[in-house]
Amino acid sequence: MTASARRPLTLNVEKVMRKRKRRLLDFALYAGIGIGVVTAVITAASHGSDMHRTMRWAGFGTVTLILFGILVSDYRAQRKNLRMWMVLGGCFFVHVVIGSLLISRIENIPPILFGVLYVAELPLLRAVVKRLLPN
């Protein structure tokens, strides 16, 4: 008798369902990234070819991606915890609102400033998340 014949059918069904769920989540992620890229391109095209403005937003987007990628990675053990996603979502919202206000108001932002802000903001965000999430 083969190994697959000895396993109960329910384990195979559960495995297939997990795989389908993962594929659906991957598809949703890819669709979200695609929608974001298309929105960014349309927004950039509608504002003309202001390279400084585009680079400011690209820098902010890159820093945001890195910051929250690291935070999600730090708390991946709690990925099924709704409170963790609420805390990270709240931090993301505050980060985007403050960053958008600053970028839209300041004309010339040197690229090095994004690196400095990243170095300052990551420990701050980690401290806030650690304080709001129980261990």
Image (cartoon, rainbow, N blue to C red):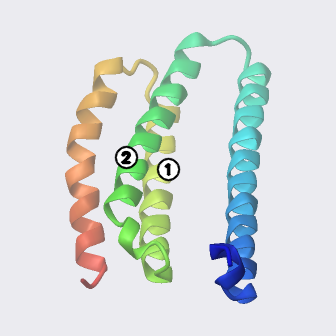
Q: Residue type at mark 1?
A: Val
The quadrant where residue 35 appears: top right
Find the distance from the CA under tag 1 to the CA under tag 2. 12 Å
- How many other residues sit within 10 Å of disc 1, few (<14), some (14-19) or many (≥20)? some
Is 99 rendered above or below residue 109?
below
Q: Quadrant of the C terminus?
A: bottom left
Lateral position of residue 128 relative to residue 106, left or right: left
Q: Which mark is residue 67?
A: 2
Numbered disc in front, either 1 or 2: 2
Question: Which residue is situated farthest in the front direction here?
Answer: 1
Q: Position of residue 133 (x, y in %)?
A: 31, 79
Total residue callouts = 2
Is 22 rendered above or below residue 102?
below
Lateral position of residue 14 relative to residue 111, left or right: right
- Element under label 1? helix
Lateral position of residue 16 relative to residue 83, left or right: right
Q: Which mark is residue 76?
A: none
Q: Quadrant of the N terminus?
A: bottom right
Question: At x 58% / y 11%, what residue is drawn?
Answer: 51
- Element under label 2? helix
Question: At x 40% / y 41%, what residue is drawn?
Answer: 66
- How many other residues sit within 10 Å of disc 2, few (<14), some (14-19) or many (≥20)? many
Task: Tell me which label, 1 or 2, sits earlier in the chain.
Answer: 2
Q: Position of residue 79 (x, y in %)?
A: 46, 72
Q: Which mark is residue 96?
A: 1
Query: CB under 8 Å between callouts 1 and 2?
Result: no
| Nearer-the-camera pick, 53 or 115 | 115
Q: Position of residue 50 (x, y in %)?
A: 63, 13
Q: Position of residue 93 (x, y in %)?
A: 50, 60
Q: Residue type at mark 2?
A: Leu
